Amino acid sequence: MSLLHTYARYDVRFKRGEGARLWDDAGNEYLDFLCGISVSSVGHCHPAVVEAVRSQAARLMHVGNLFYTEPMERLAARLTGLFGGEGGVFFTNSGAEAVEAALKVGRKAKQGGDVITAQGAFHGRTYGALSATPQESKQAPFAPLVPGFRAVETAAIAESVDERTALVLIEPIQGETGVHVISDEVLRSIREACDRHGASLIFDEIQTGLGRTGKVWAHEWSGVVPDAITTAKALGGGLPIGALITGARLRDVFAPGDHGSTFAGGAVVAAAANAALDVLTDPALLARVVSLGQDLRTQLAGLPGARDVRGMGLMCAFDVDGNAPDLVRRALYEQRLVCNATGPATIRLLPPLVIGEAEIEDAVGRLHAVLA
């Protein structure tokens, strides 16, 4: 095998996908309740995304960011509109790159300063994003990291913000450490503290955004408006694209030459993202995400040994008494159900947002077979 050993891969080779289903090279069918960690939120190979990619690829693939393309301009306008309409967009190729841009714009706005992040956060694996991810197992092999980062317990972030603080970077729901929802009260207190000290508040909406919780952005539930957000994952409908979206306060911080990316916002991925947005911003779909998420969590609570069922919309997790990674492996091989473990006792579910009631019942039934 020529791949570097950076992933603990399962011995499954997927060949085809459609909606919430995957097929391996032996013809076995799987029910996907992970969708590439919240990437394929419109389902696998959504016809509108496929057609947008095919059509754009036949006309123009790449010109670089010294020029404009219609798909890129249209996508930027739509994303800005979905975030208040007064800011701007910097496109990236991934969520981690969007975080890097967020760190730079926040620090430049304050002309330096510290970055405060939450204990239990995950923001990516590039050096800036890794420095904002206070997990010893991920950081230690790559020290020294970028200086000026302070990790604080979530409830204590507001009181930790001071004149030295350039920005607070926080996920409205911590995904990679087990789907932990940050309370509205905590988010409001952080917003107030940032306002008092001239710091930027930036929400990492890479996993929580674009309909995953039943609103376009998870922070809409709290009513707290950040100065910028990062997005990626579901944005491209399966293709790699991310973005830093700023509000009015940070719109003019970057100057030409401050930041860049060769491939970011390319015509093909932007066309795919525009098609994906048509699906993910549909009010009827968002309403279904809320109701289906409630139904899913109710059914999960009835599973043998399941406890602390939690989440929002179709971003769900629960704890088990057994070994979660082993149970996830059994779910894959024995029940053909794709999900993942975010820790030794936690199972996470991130189904496509186009999922149906029958598929939810099917997935819970497969989990029951494993847990029982």
Image: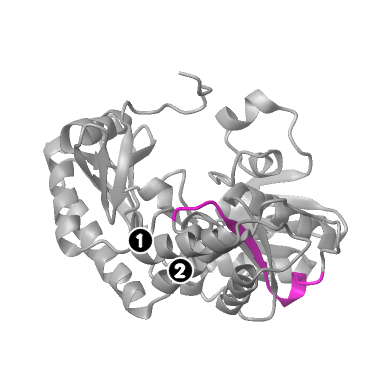
Is 171 displayed left or right of 372 in the figure?
right
Residue farthest along the front direction in this orientation: 58
Q: Earlier in the sequence, mark 2 or mark 1?
A: 1
Chain part drawn in magenta: 238-252
Residue 249 visible in the current orientation: yes
Amino acid carrying label 1: it is His
Q: Is residue 324 above or below residue 103?
A: above
The way the protein has been coloured in the rendering is: one colour
Is 244 displayed left or right of 51 in the figure?
right
**Distance CA(mark 2)–CA(mark 1):** 9 Å
Q: Residue 216 carries which label?
A: none
How many numbered dots are placed on residues in this image?
2
Q: Position of residue 170 (x, y in %)?
A: 59, 56
For label 2, the SS is helix
Q: Examine the image and state in which quarter residue 342 appears.
A: top left
* Label 1 Cα crowd, 10 Å radius (few <14 / some 14-19 / many 20+): many
